[in-house]
Image: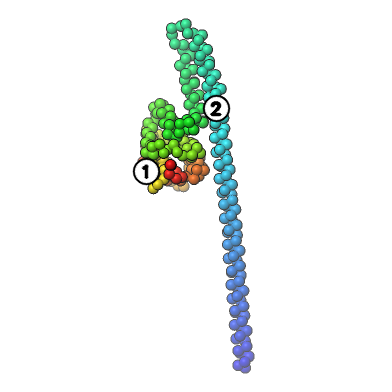
Amino acid sequence: MQKVTDNIFLLVLFAMLGTFILASSFIFFFIRYQRRINLQKESMQKAELDHSENLLHATLLSQEEERKRIGRDLHDDVGASLSNLKMIMSQAVEATTQTPAYKPLIDNIITTVRNISHSLSPPGLALFGLENTLHELFDSFNAAGKIKMNFENELGEKIDSFDEQTALAIYRIVQELMTNTVKHAGAQNILIRCFEENNNAVLSYQDDGKGMDTTNGKKSGMGMQNIEARLRMIHATSEMPAESKGFFIKIILPGKPA
């Protein structure tokens, strides 16, 4: 009787052990399967993200090429035609002592075309460097007289040592920020600073307007999305304090200029 009881006990023990091994194997293979699925999902998400970044990069480069083409056409064709028209009409009335009424109008059109051309494709960026091109942008902005632009370059000549892609991205980001200020901020002053911090080149932008509404998870507008895209393209990062007077953004650029 005792032997039968012992046999039953062993059978139950083996059954329990077998069930435990089976359950453990099931859990092990389930966890392994789940981990494989998660790795596949992460791989697909990364591939999608890389594709999106590459597509965005290609789109921005295509936009820049189109801007260059339009800028050249405006400067070379429209600008030159207007200058020739001004010269011909001036010759036609050079005998008169009064300034023709059309002259200021033509001068204004020529200036406008030149400004649009330079805005689309800043020629000074490759010829004279980023600092000179920014000063030209700020001077034309200050000429409008609506908002005062202040620029402090603590990097000195180092600001012109960025590669062409980074310099152009900085120029476009500054343009976009200024446009946002004019459209939405109701500001009177803008301060842009370039300086070094923690062995990195930094550009900060601040206006004294009403700031950006980031409450209730409000998404950034198209302008800020373009800025974020350009930052990713040159591997730069940005910081925007939650509480600041007006709008403030600090852009940490990739590496220290030589």
Residue found at the far bottom of this picture:
1
| Residue type beneath disc 1 | Ser
Q: How is the image coloured?
A: rainbow
Quadrant of the rendering where the C terminus is positioned: top left
Q: Residue 149 location, x and y as percent? A: 38, 32
Quadrant of the rendering where the N terminus is positioned: bottom right
Viewer can see residue 223: no
Counting labels gives 2
| Residue tagged 2 | 72
In this view, the residue in front, 71 or 255, is: 255
Q: Please rate how many residues cluster around mark 2, counting C-alpha atoms within 10 Å: few if below 14, some from 14 to 19, many from 20.
A: some
- Whichever of callouts 1 and 2 sits on the residue coming sooner in the sequence is 2
Residue 244's label in the rendered image is 1
> What whole-number distance in Å separates the C-alpha atoms at marks 1 and 2?
41 Å
In this view, the residue in front, 247 or 138, is: 138
In this view, the residue in front, 27 or 195, is: 195
Position of residue 95 relative to residue 145, above or below, is above
